[in-house]
Amino acid sequence: MTFVQTIQTKPFEGQKPGTSGLRKKVKVFAGPHYAENFIQSVFDTLSGYQDQTLVIGGDGRHFNSEVIVKAIRMAAANGFGRVLVGRDGLLSTPAASNIIRKNNAFGGLILSASHNPGGPDGDFGIKYNASNGGPAPEKLTDAIYARTQAITSYKTMDGTVDLARIGASTLGSMTVEVIDPVDDYAVLMQSLFDFDAISALFKSGFSMKFDGMSAITGPYASRILEGMLGGKSGTVMNGTPLPDFGGHHPDPNLVHARELVDLVMPPGGPDFGAASDGDGDRNLIIGRGMYVTPSDSLAIIAANATLAPGYATGLVGVARSMPTSGAADRVAAKLGIKCFETPTGWKFFGNLLDAGLATVCGEESFGTGSNHVREKDGLWAVLMWLNILAHRKESVYDIVTHHWRDYGRNFYTRHDYEEVESDAANRLIKNLRDSLPKLAGQHDISKADDFAYDDPVDGSSTKNQGIRLIFENGSRIVYRLSGTGTAGATLRVYVESYEADTAKHNQDPQVALAPLIKLARSIPDIAKHTGRFEPTVIT
Ligand code: VG1
Ligand code: CO
């Protein structure tokens, strides 16, 4: 017999969800009551979930199974009727979103710190997704935070939970159903893309490398790329999820996916390379001699989406986060559809997708996705690219350069200054904000503001989402502080400039953007505030 226990607790400071859920060091999460407090605060903020279904899964990082078991016990004690959990506690973020939608679940808990490093000294995270499968909107995360500051007890219960075996069991009066993490997701992908054409492409000798970065997408990529599409064995590298991601930083960019980049970029390399992050929602796309920036990838996907069966009838609209380049806007204009500009973070796309205003969305931070789920989706982007390659029968290099020829090129770069002192970073942003009125007019800046967003669907408004300097020729510099880090502050500086002249498209973005980058550093005097003369990561 199992009994519900009520455990007394006290609030922890700082359980405030950031851009994508609550993220802290594993050591913080592992402290007594820490995870429980947050999970109970989520439940306390919701209502109407009695006897309903909750989806639970995580990216397999260190401490994943411990928190999964805690969450299942608490769900049972709080009165959920059923929990759907991936085998071994594993679910990629997009797969979890799909399972919530497909099963009409009340919501889901996704345990992940995404692209942040894992292991005992790494990061952990928890995020709540609502019944549409998407990240909780700000109104909800604000309420959850408020609850964490007032919580006095949480509910849990004893009982065994076996995550290794597919099938149903009970815990108290709740059903625990352990499901295959990949099955439903694979079916969904098959319904969207031309698997026959992609299989034929692989048969014709096309070669690809997918880097699972020892994170969650390995099993998904192996099943789909090698199993269903006939990519040759070895197409997927680092395909086994490891609790510490093999010591790597599971962030699919040119710096952290170096192994893949060095394999694919040189002459003689495979035709196509891709990678995904810790929880499977980001993507890196490269071809021989061509790195596709996420902003360009969004634009190219939007321009070619109708080649995929799931999008054959066309797009209703496109959405991008504010710092993402304007390349997608040009495609939308040509297609005669709207391009929405939202704050950073996938939660802001949810309403647009639910309301049928946008089909494809993207962020400069290696995130692309569509209305098939309510999260960005790494493998989805890879399959979309494969679908485009299979139909256009051109190289990645040609597809990208032809896109620039047709639309012009939005040169783009992001410079990150990681782990700078928080006070210094906040001061830098405050000074910039204070100087906005006098910046307009200087250096050909036509508009200087702090980005605010009014949601066209529910009318909610969100302020202070990034300082924008917009120049007369349309170039932009954007500054914002990261909301996903767990140590100090990370200053992100985004620089963009449009070039219509094809003869100038073949430049290194760092060279093409050099004058703007110089200004981006000098206007707020980054070196003076942070003591840094160069960024830590350039993407
Ligand atoms: C970063 C990215 C943002 C993305 C978020 C979550 O946030 O900039 O575009 O949505 O990570 O991605 P920030 O606040 O650090 O800039 V994931 O793959 O970590 O869930
Ligand atoms: Co992620």
Image (cartoon, grey):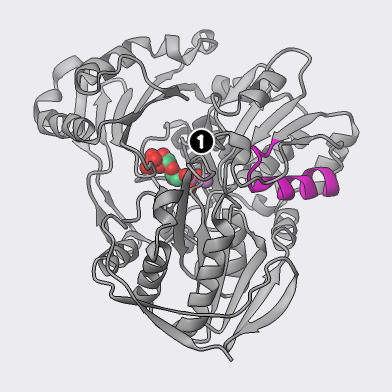
Q: Is residue 514 left or right of residue 53?
A: left
Q: Position of residue 406 (x, y in %)?
A: 56, 24
Residue under the image location 61 percent in, 44 percent down: 378
Residue under the image location 21 percent in, 22 percent down: 445
| Residue that protrudes farthest toward the bottom in the picture | 1
Residue under the image location 25 percent in, 56 percent down: 461
- Range drawn in magenta: 211-228
Helix, strand or loop for disc 1:
helix
- Asked if residue 21 shows in the view, the reply is no
Q: Is residue 393 left or right of residue 470?
A: right
Q: Position of residue 9 (x, y in %)?
A: 31, 72
Q: Is residue 307 left or right of residue 279?
A: right
Q: Amino acid at mark 1?
A: Val
Residue 213 within the magenta-colored segment of the rendering: yes
- Quadrant in the picture for residue 178: bottom right
- What main secondary structure does the magenta stretch of the protein show? helix
Relative vertical location of residue 456 with respect to residue 318 in this rendering, above or below = below
Residue bearing the label numbered 1: 331
